[in-house]
């Protein structure tokens, strides 16, 4: 079953009509929207990125029968050539924050990766998205400093606060995972304006119809 994780980039879009279910997991409960697919809104009830219970969220998706996930992630561009308003399907990721693990009490080594086959399928469905690149996750909720952005740009292309945690847990649970990242802004210091959360929301609102169309296509072709 297909699972879709949504965040800031889906806030203003009309989503499929699904039934709300609360799923209990060993890590806490999570609210899902269930039907022919399963959706999870990571910022439900206004939860900021650094307080998301990623283990409960991914555990609930697994218990609901999800075997592959497409995650929408709001991101900032670390490179001048990756313009705000564009889309990226990353093929690798890094993290500067603690990544939660299912294996807290066991010695396990799971190879963390974004699913190449699912990524290529997603690329075929969203040809306007740049395929390939590195997503780096910071803790949040604050945006990155100019000095941090310069450092991150040495090895990554876009920066966000959620996708690396979700990808890692999906790998541990044996769930295929791909991400479609909306580039909502230039990271701090790259653009000519002061970056605020309101600016990110405005970009999400501007592209809401594009996002709706992409979600509809993914559900139709992968669901």
Image: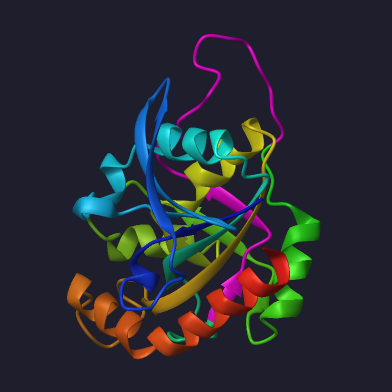
Residue 68 placement (x, y as % from top left):
67, 50
Q: How many marks?
A: 0
- Residue lying at 81% horizontally and 58% vertically, measured from the top left: 117
129 sits left or right of 145 in the view: right
Residue 166 vertical position relative to residue 132 in the rendered view, above or below: above
Residue 27 placement (x, y as % from top left):
39, 24
Residue numbers of the magenta segment: 87-111
Residue 98 in view: no
Residue projecting furthest to the right: 117
Q: Nearer the viewer, residue 220 or 218?
A: 220
Q: Nearer the viewer, residue 199 or 5?
A: 5
Magenta stretch: includes residue 93: yes
Residue 66 placement (x, y as % from top left):
62, 45
Residue 63 vertical position relative to residue 80 in the rendered view, above or below: above
Residue 28 vertical position relative to residue 133 in the rendered view, above or below: above
Q: Nearer the viewer, residue 149 or 53?
A: 53
- SS majority, magenta: loop
Residue 173 placement (x, y as % from top left):
63, 32
150 sits left or right of 164 in the view: left
- Residue lying at 70% horizontally and 85% vertically, measured from the top left: 127
Magenta stretch: includes residue 23: no
How has the structure been colored for display? rainbow
Residue 150 in view: yes
Residue 37 picture quarter: bottom right
- Residue lying at 28% horizontally and 53% vertically, measured from the top left: 44
Residue 46 picture quarter: bottom left
Instruction: Please identify the quadrant where the C terminus is shown.
Output: bottom right
120 sits left or right of 69 in the view: right
Residue 110 vertical position relative to residue 34 in the rendered view, above or below: above
């Amino acid at each position: 079953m297909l699972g879709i994780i949504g965040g800031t980039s889906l806030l203003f879009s009309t989503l499929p009509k699904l039934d709300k279910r609360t799923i209990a997991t060993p890590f806490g409960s999570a609210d899902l929207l269930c039907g022919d697919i399963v959706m999870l809104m990571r910022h439900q009830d206004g939860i900021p990125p650094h307080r998301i219970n990623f283990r409960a969220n991914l555990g609930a998706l697994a218990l609901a029968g999800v075997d592959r996930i497409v995650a929408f992630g709001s991101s900032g561009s670390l490179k001048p050539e990756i313009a705000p308003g564009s889309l990226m399907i990353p093929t690798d990721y890094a993290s500067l924050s603690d990544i939660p693990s299912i294996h807290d009490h066991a010695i396990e080594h799971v190879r963390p990766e974004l699913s190449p086959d699912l990524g290529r399928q997603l690329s075929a469905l969203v040809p306007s998205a740049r395929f390939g690149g590195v997503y780096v996750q910071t803790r949040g909720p604050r945006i990155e400093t100019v000095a941090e952005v310069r450092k991150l740009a040495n090895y990554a292309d876009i920066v966000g606060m959620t996708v690396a945690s979700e990808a890692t847990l999906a790998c541990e649970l044996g769930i295929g995972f791909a991400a479609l990242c909306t580039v909502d802004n230039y990271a701090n210091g790259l653009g000519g304006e002061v970056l605020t959360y309101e600016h990110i929301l405005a970009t999400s609102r501007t592209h809401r119809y594009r996002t709706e169309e992409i979600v509809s296509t993914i559900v139709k072709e992968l669901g």
